[in-house]
Amino acid sequence: MNRLVPLGLAIAGLALPAVPLFAQHDAHAGHQAADPIAAAIAAPSRKPANVARDQYRHPAETLAFFGVTPTQTVVEYSPSGGWYTEVLAPLVRDHGTFYALQPSGGYMDGYKSFLASDPVYDQVKLVAFPEETTSIPAGSVDTLLTFRNVHNMVMGGKAAESFKTFYTMLKPGGTLGIVDHRLPEDRDSAAEQKSGYLKVSTVRKLAEDAGFEYVGASEVNANPKDTADWEKGVWTLPPTLRNKEVDKDKYLAIGESDRMTLKFRKPTA
Protein backbone atom coordinates (compact mmCIF):
# COMPACT_ATOMS: atom_id res chain seq x y z
CA MET A 1 0.00 0.00 0.00
CA ASN A 2 1.16 3.54 -0.66
CA ARG A 3 1.77 4.49 2.92
CA LEU A 4 4.45 6.76 4.30
CA VAL A 5 6.54 5.46 7.17
CA PRO A 6 5.90 7.71 10.18
CA LEU A 7 8.83 10.00 10.77
CA GLY A 8 9.06 8.87 14.38
CA LEU A 9 9.66 5.28 13.32
CA ALA A 10 12.17 6.27 10.68
CA ILE A 11 14.37 8.06 13.20
CA ALA A 12 13.75 5.87 16.24
CA GLY A 13 16.92 5.22 18.19
CA LEU A 14 18.82 8.23 16.87
CA ALA A 15 20.12 10.84 19.29
CA LEU A 16 18.48 14.12 18.45
CA PRO A 17 18.95 17.57 19.94
CA ALA A 18 16.21 18.77 22.22
CA VAL A 19 13.70 20.99 20.44
CA PRO A 20 11.28 23.20 22.35
CA LEU A 21 7.67 22.09 22.05
CA PHE A 22 6.62 25.42 20.56
CA ALA A 23 9.24 25.05 17.84
CA GLN A 24 7.95 21.58 16.96
CA HIS A 25 4.42 22.96 16.74
CA ASP A 26 5.46 25.82 14.48
CA ALA A 27 7.33 23.46 12.18
CA HIS A 28 4.29 21.21 11.90
CA ALA A 29 2.04 24.17 11.14
CA GLY A 30 4.42 25.31 8.43
CA HIS A 31 4.37 21.86 6.84
CA GLN A 32 0.56 21.81 6.88
CA ALA A 33 0.42 25.25 5.28
CA ALA A 34 2.80 24.10 2.55
CA ASP A 35 0.63 21.05 1.75
CA PRO A 36 -2.40 22.29 -0.20
CA ILE A 37 -4.15 18.90 -0.19
CA ALA A 38 -3.86 18.67 3.59
CA ALA A 39 -5.18 22.21 3.91
CA ALA A 40 -8.17 21.39 1.68
CA ILE A 41 -8.94 18.26 3.68
CA ALA A 42 -8.87 20.38 6.84
CA ALA A 43 -11.28 22.95 5.37
CA PRO A 44 -13.89 23.97 7.98
CA SER A 45 -16.60 23.75 5.30
CA ARG A 46 -16.40 19.94 5.28
CA LYS A 47 -19.27 18.14 6.99
CA PRO A 48 -18.19 16.15 10.09
CA ALA A 49 -19.97 13.04 8.79
CA ASN A 50 -17.88 13.21 5.62
CA VAL A 51 -14.65 13.77 7.53
CA ALA A 52 -15.41 10.61 9.49
CA ARG A 53 -15.20 8.66 6.24
CA ASP A 54 -11.65 9.77 5.46
CA GLN A 55 -10.48 6.55 7.14
CA TYR A 56 -12.05 4.59 4.27
CA ARG A 57 -11.53 6.99 1.37
CA HIS A 58 -8.00 8.30 2.08
CA PRO A 59 -8.39 11.58 0.16
CA ALA A 60 -4.87 12.84 0.83
CA GLU A 61 -3.13 9.73 -0.49
CA THR A 62 -5.60 9.30 -3.32
CA LEU A 63 -5.31 12.83 -4.70
CA ALA A 64 -1.53 12.77 -4.30
CA PHE A 65 -1.39 9.52 -6.29
CA PHE A 66 -3.42 11.09 -9.08
CA GLY A 67 -1.13 14.14 -9.05
CA VAL A 68 -3.80 16.77 -8.39
CA THR A 69 -2.43 20.27 -7.75
CA PRO A 70 -4.06 23.67 -6.98
CA THR A 71 -3.25 25.13 -10.42
CA GLN A 72 -4.91 22.42 -12.49
CA THR A 73 -8.17 22.30 -14.41
CA VAL A 74 -9.95 19.40 -12.73
CA VAL A 75 -13.17 17.61 -13.67
CA GLU A 76 -15.01 15.37 -11.25
CA TYR A 77 -17.50 13.16 -13.06
CA SER A 78 -20.66 12.46 -11.05
CA PRO A 79 -19.81 14.21 -7.77
CA SER A 80 -23.19 13.03 -6.44
CA GLY A 81 -23.69 14.59 -3.00
CA GLY A 82 -20.34 16.40 -3.02
CA TRP A 83 -18.07 14.27 -0.81
CA TYR A 84 -14.95 14.90 -2.91
CA THR A 85 -16.13 18.36 -3.94
CA GLU A 86 -15.64 19.37 -0.31
CA VAL A 87 -11.91 18.77 -0.87
CA LEU A 88 -11.42 19.58 -4.55
CA ALA A 89 -13.28 22.91 -4.59
CA PRO A 90 -11.11 24.63 -1.95
CA LEU A 91 -8.00 22.94 -3.35
CA VAL A 92 -8.23 24.57 -6.79
CA ARG A 93 -10.48 27.54 -5.97
CA ASP A 94 -7.87 30.32 -6.11
CA HIS A 95 -5.47 29.14 -8.80
CA GLY A 96 -7.22 26.45 -10.84
CA THR A 97 -10.58 25.48 -12.31
CA PHE A 98 -13.03 22.87 -11.04
CA TYR A 99 -15.83 21.44 -13.16
CA ALA A 100 -18.49 19.30 -11.52
CA LEU A 101 -19.74 17.09 -14.37
CA GLN A 102 -23.02 15.91 -12.86
CA PRO A 103 -25.42 13.56 -14.67
CA SER A 104 -28.73 15.33 -15.13
CA GLY A 105 -31.54 14.26 -12.81
CA GLY A 106 -30.81 12.24 -9.69
CA TYR A 107 -28.43 14.22 -7.52
CA MET A 108 -28.58 17.47 -9.51
CA ASP A 109 -31.00 19.45 -7.33
CA GLY A 110 -29.35 18.31 -4.10
CA TYR A 111 -25.91 19.15 -5.50
CA LYS A 112 -27.05 22.66 -6.42
CA SER A 113 -28.24 23.16 -2.84
CA PHE A 114 -24.92 21.84 -1.59
CA LEU A 115 -22.99 24.34 -3.73
CA ALA A 116 -25.12 27.18 -2.37
CA SER A 117 -24.40 26.15 1.22
CA ASP A 118 -20.94 27.75 1.50
CA PRO A 119 -18.99 30.49 -0.34
CA VAL A 120 -16.03 28.14 -0.78
CA TYR A 121 -17.99 26.55 -3.66
CA ASP A 122 -18.61 29.81 -5.51
CA GLN A 123 -16.09 28.99 -8.25
CA VAL A 124 -17.39 25.48 -9.00
CA LYS A 125 -18.55 25.21 -12.62
CA LEU A 126 -21.55 22.87 -12.65
CA VAL A 127 -22.02 21.09 -15.98
CA ALA A 128 -24.94 18.76 -16.72
CA PHE A 129 -23.94 15.46 -18.30
CA PRO A 130 -24.44 14.76 -21.15
CA GLU A 131 -26.41 17.84 -22.24
CA GLU A 132 -23.78 20.49 -21.46
CA THR A 133 -20.62 18.41 -21.76
CA THR A 134 -19.26 20.39 -24.72
CA SER A 135 -19.11 23.51 -22.51
CA ILE A 136 -15.87 22.00 -21.17
CA PRO A 137 -13.41 22.74 -24.00
CA ALA A 138 -11.88 19.70 -25.64
CA GLY A 139 -8.27 19.15 -24.62
CA SER A 140 -8.45 21.62 -21.72
CA VAL A 141 -8.52 19.35 -18.64
CA ASP A 142 -5.44 18.35 -16.63
CA THR A 143 -7.10 15.71 -14.43
CA LEU A 144 -10.47 13.98 -14.64
CA LEU A 145 -11.55 12.04 -11.58
CA THR A 146 -14.44 9.70 -10.89
CA PHE A 147 -15.04 7.97 -7.58
CA ARG A 148 -17.19 4.83 -7.39
CA ASN A 149 -19.06 5.58 -10.60
CA VAL A 150 -17.72 3.30 -13.34
CA HIS A 151 -19.87 0.42 -12.07
CA ASN A 152 -22.94 2.60 -12.71
CA MET A 153 -21.74 3.28 -16.25
CA VAL A 154 -21.27 -0.45 -16.83
CA MET A 155 -24.65 -1.40 -15.41
CA GLY A 156 -26.28 1.36 -17.46
CA GLY A 157 -24.54 0.41 -20.70
CA LYS A 158 -22.90 3.84 -21.06
CA ALA A 159 -19.32 3.10 -20.04
CA ALA A 160 -17.59 3.08 -23.45
CA GLU A 161 -19.32 6.30 -24.49
CA SER A 162 -18.41 8.02 -21.21
CA PHE A 163 -14.75 7.05 -21.43
CA LYS A 164 -14.55 8.51 -24.95
CA THR A 165 -15.98 11.76 -23.59
CA PHE A 166 -13.35 11.80 -20.84
CA TYR A 167 -10.62 11.24 -23.42
CA THR A 168 -11.82 14.20 -25.51
CA MET A 169 -11.83 16.55 -22.50
CA LEU A 170 -8.33 15.77 -21.30
CA LYS A 171 -5.17 17.45 -22.51
CA PRO A 172 -2.50 15.25 -24.08
CA GLY A 173 -0.65 13.90 -21.06
CA GLY A 174 -3.69 14.51 -18.84
CA THR A 175 -4.66 12.08 -16.10
CA LEU A 176 -7.78 9.96 -15.68
CA GLY A 177 -8.11 8.83 -12.06
CA ILE A 178 -10.58 6.10 -11.10
CA VAL A 179 -11.63 4.63 -7.77
CA ASP A 180 -14.23 1.85 -7.75
CA HIS A 181 -15.38 -1.25 -5.91
CA ARG A 182 -13.14 -4.20 -6.82
CA LEU A 183 -14.35 -7.63 -7.91
CA PRO A 184 -11.73 -10.42 -7.75
CA GLU A 185 -10.55 -11.45 -11.20
CA ASP A 186 -11.59 -15.07 -10.72
CA ARG A 187 -15.28 -14.23 -10.14
CA ASP A 188 -18.05 -14.57 -12.71
CA SER A 189 -18.16 -11.38 -14.79
CA ALA A 190 -21.97 -11.48 -14.61
CA ALA A 191 -21.62 -10.07 -11.09
CA GLU A 192 -20.49 -6.78 -12.62
CA GLN A 193 -24.02 -6.17 -13.87
CA LYS A 194 -25.69 -6.19 -10.47
CA SER A 195 -23.25 -6.18 -7.54
CA GLY A 196 -21.63 -2.75 -7.89
CA TYR A 197 -18.20 -4.43 -8.08
CA LEU A 198 -15.95 -4.46 -11.16
CA LYS A 199 -12.81 -6.32 -12.12
CA VAL A 200 -9.67 -4.25 -12.60
CA SER A 201 -9.31 -5.86 -16.02
CA THR A 202 -12.75 -4.56 -17.01
CA VAL A 203 -11.90 -0.98 -16.08
CA ARG A 204 -8.52 -1.19 -17.77
CA LYS A 205 -10.11 -2.44 -20.98
CA LEU A 206 -12.65 0.40 -20.98
CA ALA A 207 -9.91 2.98 -20.54
CA GLU A 208 -7.47 1.43 -22.99
CA ASP A 209 -10.18 0.93 -25.63
CA ALA A 210 -10.89 4.66 -25.36
CA GLY A 211 -7.21 5.40 -26.04
CA PHE A 212 -5.78 5.81 -22.53
CA GLU A 213 -2.45 4.44 -21.36
CA TYR A 214 -2.37 2.60 -18.04
CA VAL A 215 0.03 4.29 -15.62
CA GLY A 216 -0.36 2.25 -12.44
CA ALA A 217 -2.40 1.35 -9.38
CA SER A 218 -2.36 2.16 -5.68
CA GLU A 219 -3.64 -0.07 -2.90
CA VAL A 220 -4.41 2.89 -0.68
CA ASN A 221 -8.16 2.19 -0.85
CA ALA A 222 -7.90 -1.58 -0.46
CA ASN A 223 -9.93 -3.37 2.21
CA PRO A 224 -9.08 -7.09 2.59
CA LYS A 225 -12.04 -7.54 4.95
CA ASP A 226 -14.45 -7.09 2.05
CA THR A 227 -15.21 -10.44 0.39
CA ALA A 228 -17.20 -8.78 -2.44
CA ASP A 229 -19.82 -11.55 -2.44
CA TRP A 230 -22.74 -9.94 -0.62
CA GLU A 231 -26.27 -10.95 -1.56
CA LYS A 232 -27.29 -7.30 -1.89
CA GLY A 233 -24.07 -6.21 -3.52
CA VAL A 234 -21.67 -3.55 -2.37
CA TRP A 235 -24.60 -1.63 -0.87
CA THR A 236 -24.63 -4.20 1.95
CA LEU A 237 -21.62 -2.41 3.42
CA PRO A 238 -21.45 1.12 4.82
CA PRO A 239 -22.36 3.79 4.09
CA THR A 240 -25.55 2.35 2.51
CA LEU A 241 -26.12 -0.61 4.87
CA ARG A 242 -28.95 -2.00 2.75
CA ASN A 243 -29.81 -4.62 5.39
CA LYS A 244 -30.39 -1.78 7.87
CA GLU A 245 -30.16 -3.17 11.42
CA VAL A 246 -29.61 -6.80 10.38
CA ASP A 247 -25.95 -7.68 11.10
CA LYS A 248 -25.19 -3.95 11.15
CA ASP A 249 -22.28 -4.30 13.57
CA LYS A 250 -20.74 -6.96 11.35
CA TYR A 251 -20.79 -4.71 8.30
CA LEU A 252 -19.58 -1.67 10.22
CA ALA A 253 -16.62 -3.74 11.40
CA ILE A 254 -15.78 -4.59 7.80
CA GLY A 255 -16.00 -0.96 6.75
CA GLU A 256 -16.44 0.42 3.26
CA SER A 257 -15.68 -1.68 0.20
CA ASP A 258 -12.40 -2.94 -1.18
CA ARG A 259 -11.48 -0.50 -3.94
CA MET A 260 -9.18 -0.28 -6.90
CA THR A 261 -7.37 3.02 -7.43
CA LEU A 262 -6.21 3.26 -11.06
CA LYS A 263 -4.33 5.97 -12.92
CA PHE A 264 -4.42 6.41 -16.69
CA ARG A 265 -2.89 8.97 -19.05
CA LYS A 266 -3.98 10.41 -22.38
CA PRO A 267 -1.01 9.91 -24.72
CA THR A 268 0.97 12.99 -25.64
CA ALA A 269 1.51 11.96 -29.26
Image (spheres, grey):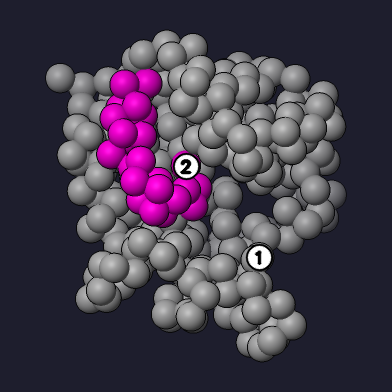
Disc nearer the start of the sequence (2/1): 2
- Name the residue nearer the viewer: 41 or 49: 49
Please state which amino acid type lies under the numbered disc 1.
Pro
In the picture provided, is 31 more to the left or to the right than 110?
left
Residue name at image x 74 percent, y 38 percent: 110
**Which element is circle 2 on?**
strand
- Name the residue nearer the viewer: 220 or 202: 202
- Name the residue nearer the viewer: 5 or 199: 199
Where, quadrant-wise, is the N terminus in this rendering? bottom left
Disc 1 marks which residue?
A: 239
Residue name at image x 66 percent, y 65 percent: 239
Please state which amino acid type lies under the numbered disc 2.
Thr
- Name the residue nearer the viewer: 93 or 5: 93
In the picture provided, is 116 more to the left or to the right than 16?
right
Where, quadrant-wise, is the C terminus in this rendering? top left
Depicted 70 relative to depicted 243: above or below: above
Residue name at image x 36 percent, y 34 percent: 162
Depicted 155 relative to depicted 162: above or below: below
Q: Which residues are magenta?
A: 146-169
Q: Is residue 240 magenta?
A: no
**Which mark is on residue 146?**
2
Residue name at image x 73 percent, y 61 percent: 52
Q: Is residue 58 among the parts visible in the rendering?
A: yes
Whole-percent x, y for residue 149 in the image? 47, 48
Q: Is residue 168 magenta?
A: yes
- The answer to which quarter of the image holds residue 182 is bottom left
